[in-house]
Amino acid sequence: MNASLSLDAVNALTANEFISRFGDIAEHSKWVAEKAEVVRPYPDHAAMVLAFQQAVLEADRERQLQLILAHPDLAGRAALDDQMADESKREQRGAGLDTLNKEEFEQFHNLNNTYRARFGFPFIFAVTGANKHQILESFSNRVGGTLEEERLTALAQILRIIRFRLAARVSL
């Protein structure tokens, strides 16, 4: 990840520089940054966050599902195979998901499989500021929800992830 930029510096980026800098804010979904870029200049940090979030919310259902599917399982195979985006790795590491014992790993693995089989997409949780116990509790609670509840909850969690990632990259 690059050093934090000021909002003035963000607004001064060319479109290509902006996409290069922020194209990975939404997991493997550069289109979110492309949509957010066209509403610059941002008057404040909140407007920038809103532009990214609006890009997600205004997307059609299929594109939203593609975004949800682009996220890795928490403490899943992608983490073991080193196939996650760098920010996902840092976020999961910050929540202690890289230090799971065997039983905890199995619990995550089983919940990931159950959740994915039930809903057809990965469990998404903005792990910044959370620990593995809080994540497991949410996982256990949400696995019994309805498909529409979980689709909307996944999108809400993605919006939180975007906010956290932008806060880390753009100085307030």
Image (tube, rainbow, N blue to C red):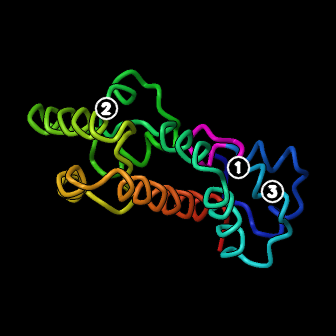
The residue stretch that appears in magenta: 24-32
Q: Which residue is tagged 3? A: 37
Instruction: First in sequence, mark 1 or 3: give its number.
Output: 1
Image side of residue 104 versus residue 60, left or right: left
Instruction: First in sequence, mark 2 or 1: give its number.
Output: 1
CB-based contact (under 8 Å), mark 1 and mark 3: yes
> Which image quarter holds the N terminus?
top right
The Cα–Cα distance between marks 1 and 3, rounded to whole angstroms, is 9 Å
The Cα–Cα distance between marks 2 and 1, rounded to whole angstroms, is 25 Å
Q: Count the marks.
A: 3
**Residue 78 sits in quarter:** top left
> Which image quarter holds the C terminus?
bottom right
Q: Which residue is tagged 1? A: 22
Secondary-structure class at tag 2: loop
- At x 71%, y 74%, the residue is 47
- At x 28%, y 33%, the residue is 117
Instruction: Specify few, some or many for label 3: CA neighbours under 10 Å numbering under 14, 14-19, or 20 or more.
Output: many
The residue type indicated by label 1 comes to Phe
x then y, percent, for residue 139: 23, 51
Q: Quick check: is 25 in the magenta stretch?
A: yes
- Which residue is at the front of the view, 62 or 44? 62
- At x 33%, y 41%, the residue is 119
x then y, percent, for residue 53: 62, 63
Image side of residue 15 versus residue 88, left or right: right
- Which residue is at the front of the view, 126 or 117? 117
Checking the image for residue 76, the label placed there is 2
CB-based contact (under 8 Å), mark 3 and mark 2: no
x then y, percent, for residue 16: 86, 44
